[in-house]
Amino acid sequence: MAHRPKRTFRQRRADSSDSDGTEGPSAGPGQPGEPAAPGPEDEGPPPGGGRAEAARRPFRGRGSRGRGRVWASSRRAIGAAPRAGGGSGAPESRTVDHSADEEDGTQHASESKDDQSSPSNSSSSLEEEFSSIAFIQAARRKRELARTQEDYISLDVKHTSTISDMKENSDEDPESEPDDHEERIPFTPKPQTLKQRMAEETTTRNEETSEGSQEDENQDIWEQQQMRKAIKITEGRNIDLSHSSEFQTVKKFDTSISFPPVNLEIIKKQLNTRLTLLQDTHRSHLREYEKYIEDVKSSKNAIQNLENSSDQAPNIKFYKSMKIYVENLIDCLNEKITNIQEIESSMHALLLKQAMTFMKRRQDELKHESTYLQQLSRKAETSTNGSLAIDEKTQWILEEIESRRARRRQARALSGNCDPQEGASSDDELSSADMIDFQKSQDDILQDHKKIFEDVHDDFCNIQNILLKFQQWREKFPDSYYEAFIGLCIPKLLNPLIRVQLIDWNPLKFDSIGLKQMSWFTSIEEFMDSSMEDAKKEDSSDKKILSAVINKTIIPRLTDFVEFIWDPLSTSQTTSLITHCGMILEEHSTWENEVSKGKQDLLKSIVSRMKKAIEDDVFIPLYPKSAVENKTSPHSKFQERQFWSGLKLFCNILLWNGLLPDDALQELALGKLLNRYLIVALHNAVPGPDVVKKCSQITAYLPEKWFENSAMRTSIPQLENFIQFLLQSAHKLSRSEFRDEVKEIILILVKVRALNQADSFIEEYHLDHLKSVINEV
């Protein structure tokens, strides 16, 4: 906010001429605190020696204790420089405001045109003091302006600044304000004339009005007023304030910046360039506008033609109905897919829990029984008297194992299967309580499974009805049907519905329904067969729908069963799994590459699971021959059960012949199982008819296609250890009473195409009657 400076000497003198007040009692220099009211005599020129009297008065500096400041107030400060530059001979007038001992009294000293003959010593001392103060105030003002970076009009005041500049600077600079103890406190208001009161009211109203306006605008107005007063513009002359504003604006620019020259040709060229750009833009907008007009016209014509055409009306109606139907179908499946996934996960978790229960129980029972027999062997070596003390848990497990074996023997007897090999039967029985819990959980899941689509119309949950909709599309508008690649979309649409039908399907159960007997399978086959009659059957993708469904839906489900639920030691589970996988891998092997990736993943899972079963579930202990010679001893019985269990796994692995590659089967069955476990157990057994029977059983499980080559006289490399064991057994049996078993061994060698070894053995032992066996091959 701009501050209005105090009135000058001329204003006060003009005001005092109108007042008719009398001079009050003046306060003496030694009477502080008494107010002094200046009268007309104080404001007029001093009589005679007033100037000398003012010079004789002591000057009170700022640092004088008990004295006021020296306030410089003059309105001629702004106009001082122009007047000096113009060479005007007008005499200067200064007003010195001295603060006396009375803080509220103010004495005014002025210089008039007649006071030029005053003493030089007083005048020079005042001028030097005022010059120093003005210089300090000017430096402070420049520092403040540099700090705030405000806009101003520079006035070259040089060193002739009057007391009013110092007053103005002191008002703007907070540091120059008097201290609290130095401020003048008026105790009695001075009498004011009418003009003074009017001027004060006008000043108050102007200040109140200027408080709501912007600071920069008020500052400009105040500076303009100061400029008019400083240069004493004659009355009646109008000042162009806009010129002052332009002067201020020009001052803001940096004069160091050089601008290119501007002439009429440059301006004309720029205008022509601008005009050309606008014309180009206008033409482009016109072209776009014309294009939009043509598009609107063509669209209206197409709509009118379609409305008038009787052939297109049914097409539009059909496409609209199909669009609505497909959108509703997708919304329905998206809403139900979460429930389908939850029920699938529940059924999978239930089957996985049952499979893990069987596996853990078998491994725990094997561990406890083996530990018990080892303790029994150590006890027999140390002492022949006394019984072996075992813990209650081991005793309970052994009793449970024996009770289940007894039930299996009884079941085999009732069924007419008198196979005495106990290790060859599956140990997957559940207790009655566990069976009830499992059945209850399964029924609950199937009950939820039936509720998935109970609130859905058959057109959106029945596969046959869905395929019928697309079949109508294919028959009515085959071009748009094939262009939309519906054959690639149908497997994705049918995937959730097929998964719902597979929730209660267990490919490991021997009585599970085959894929060909399922309703979705037959519906897809009928849909594919009808598409074969179309003229575009060669280009049709409908014939790949079934392969895509099997690849995306069936094979992943079979892979989960193989990895987490299938027990390779179970012959029934293996046989059922092979049946379903055979239908997929054999009958649909002609489906180009549609099931190649899924097929490879499934085969890798099968091989990995059987390898894990060999490492975790096969255990054939070795005991001293003295412990196994007695066939009724627990060691001999345990070893026999484990051998037949391993041989059962050997058989289950070779059942995959034709589905798995031969090298993978030979690596698993011969390399990892036969040579690592079964041969070692045969070497530890006592030579005799039992050993020959076991070798014959091993040979019976070997695939015949491995030995179909008639020119082959040496067996496959993986059977080399087995052939050497057969020859060793034949040598031992030829010296004993078991001569008939020797012939059985020769027949085994001939079956595995070890003809060279068989000839050598016959010639060594002169068994000429067995040469006919070799010749018959």
Image (cartoon, helix red, strand yellow):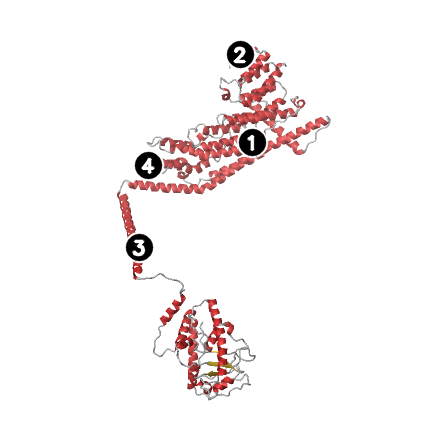
Q: Give the class, few, some or many, for how many residues have Cα within 10 Å of label 1's Cα (few <14, many ≥20).
A: few
Q: Are marks 4 and 1 in contact (CB under 8 Å)?
A: no
Q: Is residue 439 above or below residue 177?
A: above
Q: Is residue 450 left or right of residue 372?
A: left
Mark 3, Cα crowd under 10 Å, few <14 / some 14-19 / many 20+, is few
Q: Residue 771 versus residue 422: which sits nearer the camera?
A: 771
The kind of residue on which mark 2 rests is: Ser
Residue 277: image tag: 3
Residue 364 spot, x, y in % from top left: 61, 32
Which residue matches tag 1? 612
Q: CA distance from mark 2 to mark 1?
A: 44 Å
Report how far apart the C-alphas of labels 2 and 3 lie in the structure: 110 Å
Residue hosting label 2: 772
Question: Which quadrant of the structure image shows residue 618?
Answer: top right
Query: For the point 46% across and 69% down, which residue is it?
Result: 145
Tell us which disc is closer to us: 2 or 3.
3
- Which amino acid, by three-letter code, is at mark 4? Asp
Give the image location of residue 196, x and y in percent. Answer: 43, 82
In the image, is residue 61 above or below residue 600? below
State the mark number for residue 479.
Answer: 4
**3D distance between C-alphas at marks 4 and 3:** 50 Å
Q: Amino acid at mark 1?
A: Lys
